[in-house]
């Protein structure tokens, strides 16, 4: 039996990574990473994905993980790609209009000629690690805070609570995003991560919390011991592995 290969694309604020994986999550070539180009209208992102695909083995389907609010493959809002030069730079009104309600799934499917799945990037990350048992929350630490929730392996409706205030006028994004990690250093920043986890636990009462993203590796050992047995640190490679496994998730209700 021939295994189905998936082109998994993880679109971040600073880079776009891609790999071709089989259904077990094994890569069939070295993953490719390119800097995220700015300014970035939707068509340029689709072209960038198509160009990356030419450097990788042929796949039968494609999964794209995007930051922001994605519903049925349509971009409701994306935080980085509407800006002039990347995260926390000036928002360009023309890009804001271009991305609003852009059907990314249809565009990618047409451009690559493959069945496409487009989800929030944290949801794809979670697809690579969830056990499909109980309530599982996923947070990704990187440029900002990515979030996803699964119940019985099903993706729950996405909530951009990373934009909610956590302290004074700071949002969760701003409170534990990459700029604050650089400003504070890993020690003080890790204490903030622990504080966020402690604050969220009574809100979600999760069975398991997964922490991933590029900055998960920056959490200090002392902070890790304080997170609790219901918290699991997962590798950033889950963002690509999840691209293959997302096709097997139970349909959302």
Image (cartoon, grey):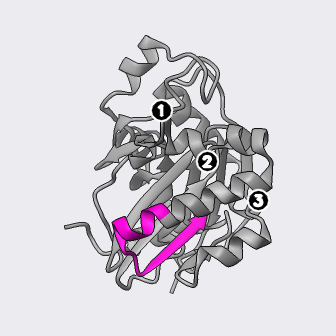
Q: CA distance from mark 3 to mark 1?
A: 25 Å
Tell me if 108 is positioned left or right of 38 in this view: left
* Residue 98 shown in magenta: no
Q: Are marks 3 and 1 in contact (CB under 8 Å)?
A: no
Q: Mark 1 = which residue? A: 169
Dividing the picture into quadrants, the one containing residue 30 is bottom right
Q: CA distance from mark 2 to mark 1?
A: 13 Å
Q: Return the mark for residue 176.
A: 2
Q: Residue furthest top?
A: 93
Q: Earlier in the sequence, mark 3 or mark 1?
A: 1
The image quadrant that residue 84 belongs to is top right
Tell me residue 174's x, y (percent): 57, 38
Q: Residue at x 40, y 55 (%)?
A: 117
Q: Which mark is residue 218?
A: 3
Labels 2 and 1: the sequence-earlier one? 1
Q: Residues within 10 Å of mark 3 (few under 14, many from 20)?
A: some
Magenta stretch encompasses residue 210: yes
Mark sitting earlier along the chain (2/3): 2
Label 2 or label 1, whichever lies nearer to me, is 1
Q: What residue do we see at 54% from left, 31% from top?
A: 80
Segment tinted magenta in the rendering: 199-212
| Mark 2 element type | helix
Which quarter of the figure is the C terminus placed in? bottom left
Give the vertical position of 237 relative to 178 (above or below): below
Q: Residue at point 42% right, 60% down?
A: 148
SS at circle 1: loop
Q: Nearer the viewer, residue 14 or 24?
A: 14
Taking 221 as reference, is 17 above or below it? above
Q: Nearer the viewer, mark 3 or mark 1?
A: 1
Find residue 197 and report its horizontal and vertical position in percent: 52, 64
Badge 2 vs badge 3, beta-carbon distance below 8 Å: no
């Amino acid at each position: 039996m021939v295994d189905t290969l998936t082109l998994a694309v993880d679109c971040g604020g600073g880079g776009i990574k891609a790999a071709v994986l089989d259904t077990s999550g094994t890569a069939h070539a070295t993953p490719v990473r390119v800097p995220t180009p700015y300014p970035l209208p939707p068509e340029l992102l689709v072209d960038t994905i198509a160009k990356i695909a030419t450097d990788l083995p042929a796949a039968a389907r494609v999964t794209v993980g995007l930051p922001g609010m994605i519903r049925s493959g349509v971009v409701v809002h994306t935080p980085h790609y509407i800006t002039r030069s990347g995260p926390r730079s000036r928002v360009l009104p023309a890009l804001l209009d271009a991305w609003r309600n852009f059907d990314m799934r249809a565009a990618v499917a047409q451009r690559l000629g493959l069945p496409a799945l487009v989800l929030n990037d944290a949801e794809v990350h979670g697809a690579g690690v969830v056990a499909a048992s109980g309530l599982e929350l996923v947070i990704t630490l990187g440029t900002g805070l990515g979030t996803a929730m699964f119940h019985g392996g099903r993706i729950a409706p996405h909530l951009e609570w990373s934009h909610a205030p956590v302290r004074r006028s700071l949002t969760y994004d701003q409170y534990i995003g990459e700029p604050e990690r650089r400003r504070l250093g890993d020690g003080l920043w890790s204490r903030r991560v622990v504080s966020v986890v402690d604050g969220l636990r009574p809100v979600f009462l999760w069975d398991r919390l997964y922490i991933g993203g590029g900055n998960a590796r920056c959490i200090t050992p002392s902070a890790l011991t304080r997170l609790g047995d219901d918290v699991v640190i997962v590798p950033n490679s889950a963002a690509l592995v999840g691209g293959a496994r997302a096709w097997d998730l139970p349909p959302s209700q």
